[in-house]
Image: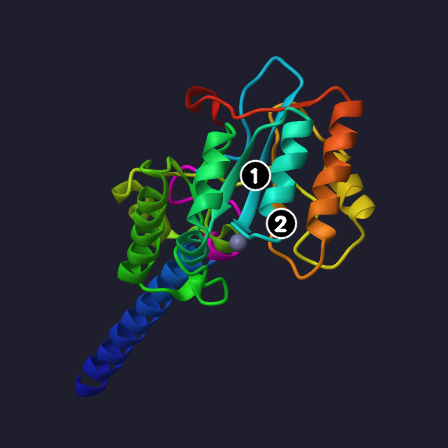
Amino acid sequence: MAAGRLAAASGALTLRGRARFASWLVHDFLWLYPTLRRNCDWHGEVVTRFSTTEREVCLTIDDGPDPRDTPEMLDLLARHQARAAFFVIGEKAERHRSLCRRILAEGHRLGNHTHSHPASRWWALPGPQVHREIARGNDTIMTATGTLPLWFRPPVGMCNFSVHRATRRNGLRVIGWSATGGDGCPAAPSQIVTRIHSGLQPGAIILLHESGSSPRRVLTLARLLETLTEDGYRCVLPPESSLL
Ligand SMILES: [Zn+2]
């Protein structure tokens, strides 16, 4: 009898242990996968395209503002009558407020790209710190320009539950992308543009970066704008209602 009770107790314990292990696995999978898979929308909206009947795309440029790249990029955009969204890092925006104001004055858009861009820790950052990064990014843009951003781009495109909760609290939409040339890694501008251009469709959101250690990123934008113009594409800022 006693042996039977012991066997039943050990069976129950095993079941409880298994249930706990299974729940730990499910929790970690639900947390980690959307964090590590770029533009994953499991926990909330991630815009990657926009609806259009025209030959239009949306350029987005991350990691500025930077006095080495931003002015030249703005000149290039003006030459091509192109519009872009600049996702700026709060710490840099604090140092270069006039560049933020120039971006807006020339018809482009400013987006929040966190305050300090903690890319390597972003996936594991506790919720309150995620909120602080996003709220401070908003405050900096507000101080520099007098306007609040509407769009947020997470570092490296990683969005978990905390990111979506914090963006909702700060009145922001998460903007991902549908076309990239991998310009975060060393490659010739022509190679990056070829990657972006292959399979490009109207309504694409294109990911670019600025603020590198060489003029490579400015050259990439120059080459891309030439290619898009030759191919009949216009670079626009899509209305909120068209975002997909
Ligand atoms: Zn970035």
For label 1, the crowd category at 10 Å Cα-Cα, with few meaning under 14, some 14 to 19 and many 20 or more, is many
Q: Is residue 41 visible?
A: no
Residue depicted at 39% across the width and 59% down the height: 26
Distance between the Cα atoms at labels 1 and 2?
14 Å
Q: Position of residue 208 (x, y in %)?
A: 63, 44
Residue depicted at 51% across the width and 41% down the height: 86
Farthest bottom residue? 2
Residue depicted at 60% across the width and 55% down the height: 211
As drawn, the label of residue 60 is: 1
Q: For numbered disc 2, what is the local secondary structure? A: loop
Q: Main secondary structure of the magenta part?
A: loop
- 82 left or right of 172 in image: right
As drawn, the label of residue 181 is: none
Q: In the picture shown, does residue 212 fall above or below 164?
A: below
- Magenta stretch: give its range: 33-45
Label 1 sits on what residue type? Answer: Thr
Q: Position of residue 163 (x, y in %)?
A: 36, 51
Residue depicted at 57% across the width and 17% down the height: 52
Q: Earlier in the sequence, mark 1 or mark 2?
A: 1
Q: Is residue 28 visible?
A: yes
Q: Position of residue 119 (x, y in %)?
A: 49, 62
Q: Which residue is mark 2?
A: 69
Picture quadrant where residue 75 is located:
top right
- Ligand 1 neighbours mark 1 (CB distance < 8 Å): no
Label 2 sits on what residue type? Answer: Asp
